[in-house]
Amino acid sequence: MWRILLEEFWGDLKAQKTRALLTGFAVVWGSMSVVLLLAFGEGLRHELEDGLLNAGERMFMVWGGTTSQPYHGLPRGRSVRLTEDDLTLLRRSIPEVDMVSPSYGQRASLEVDGHKTNTYMEGVTPPFGEMRHMYAAAGGRFLNERDVAEKRRVLFLGDSIAARLFPGGHPVGRTVSLDGLPFTVIGVMEPKFQDSSNNGPDAERAIIPASTFRAVYGDRYVDHLLVRPGDVSHAAFVKSELYRVLGRRHGFAATDEHALAIWDFIEDAKTNRAIGLGIQIFLGLVGAFTLLVAGVGLANVMVVAVRERTPEIGVKLALGARRGHIVAQFVFEALLLALAGGLLGLGIASLVILGVDAIPAGESGAMVYLLNPRLSWPIAFISVGILVAIGLAAGVLPARRAAAVDPVESLRYE
């Protein structure tokens, strides 16, 4: 039976080449469109998330602000300045806090072998690297607790600034003059994509131990504090506790939101995910409508095919053909067109995605969002499955109508 169905399908295909070509193109285009749109949407969503996470993951960046409410006889308009002692208090008072780090910051001059540059330099502690996704490339390391305890003059460099200072490579172990003092390079940051930053991208940053920063520059107040909850479900509680605990120490009301400036990376991550999901849903709907148009085209073609072949159907019925065979013939043709077109569209889309993904996107700019599509195989095969379902519906309905026609009426049909 399958051989007969294939022979009939091939004969009809040769007899109606233009119709078959246009139908196949519509199905291929529909499946290819939905896969490509969803792949680029998925890539955009991931890059939006990664761009923020590479600037800071699951943490609060806390600056001292200016009070906007009187508190226990103290006037409004007082400046709040934070110190490392505040971190000790936060760790002791809020068990839900997982990691903390101070950040002292200022512009600094770096020089080695005649190569000189200025950059933003921070004094931090080891958890900073984990929270800010500043991971060391092979052959180097980030700061450790011993560096902080011994106030070592060690330096961790962003990948871009390391490339400028050491155009020949191999900076680890080399000595760099930082504001006239010798520092040993212990590591270089692994390149990363970052679309959010504080005082410039991390690729242009120099990192030293917080204790060394205080010893060299004599700063008492930090630039800001980094605080990470152990569980994102505790984020809102930890954020409110920051105001309460620091308010009790610095003399401001726990409800005074202007007393602290907080960059909430957790909420930003939720917003980014929502934006990415919204874009993906929109692109998916566009692709789904394109797929639906292809399905409607296939259904129309099958209706026309049934009408054109009504006399042929009548002859077959008159000669004793079963109605099930008539239905199977048209269903088989519709399914084969839908499946072949869907798989071909999926193959073309996969090649396009692989080709685009192979184009260097760099570490910044709009191309990072556009040139990183991600093919979701489950979604791709679901799309093909939908096409097959459409093909089934497109074949069954006209075929049942054709098989139900009286053979005599079919033979008289023009």
Image (cartoon, rainbow, N blue to C red):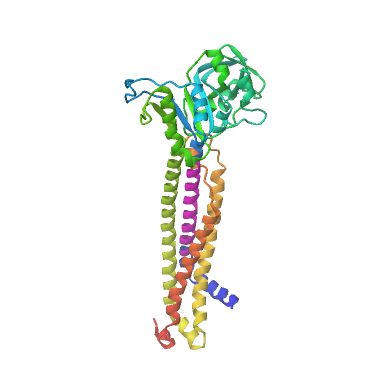
Q: Specify whether residue 55 is in view.
A: no
Q: Quadrant of residue 134?
A: top right
Above or below: residue 34 compared with residue 77: below
Quarter of the image with the N terminus in it = bottom right
- For the view shown, which residue lies furthest in the top direction? 180
Region of the chain picked out in magenta, as a range = 23-47
Q: Residue at x 48, y 88 (%)?
A: 318
Rendering coords of residue 70 (x, y %): 32, 24
Q: Residue at x 56, y 26 (%)?
A: 160
Q: Nearest the camera: 386 or 55?
A: 55
Q: Number of marks in the image? A: 0
Quarter of the image with the C terminus in it = bottom left
Left or right side of 304 for 170: right
- Look at the image and say whether residue 25 sits in the magenta stretch: yes
Left or right side of 409 for 177: right
Q: Nearest the camera: 64 or 347?
A: 64
Q: Residue at x 57, y 73 (%)?
A: 6
Rendering coords of residue 345 (x, y %): 52, 57
Q: Main secondary structure of the magenta part?
A: helix
Rendering coords of residue 346 (x, y %): 53, 56
Q: Specify whether residue 406 is in view.
A: yes
Rendering coords of residue 12 (x, y %): 51, 73
Q: Nearest the camera: 175 or 123?
A: 123
- Look at the image and say whether residue 360 sits in the magenta stretch: no
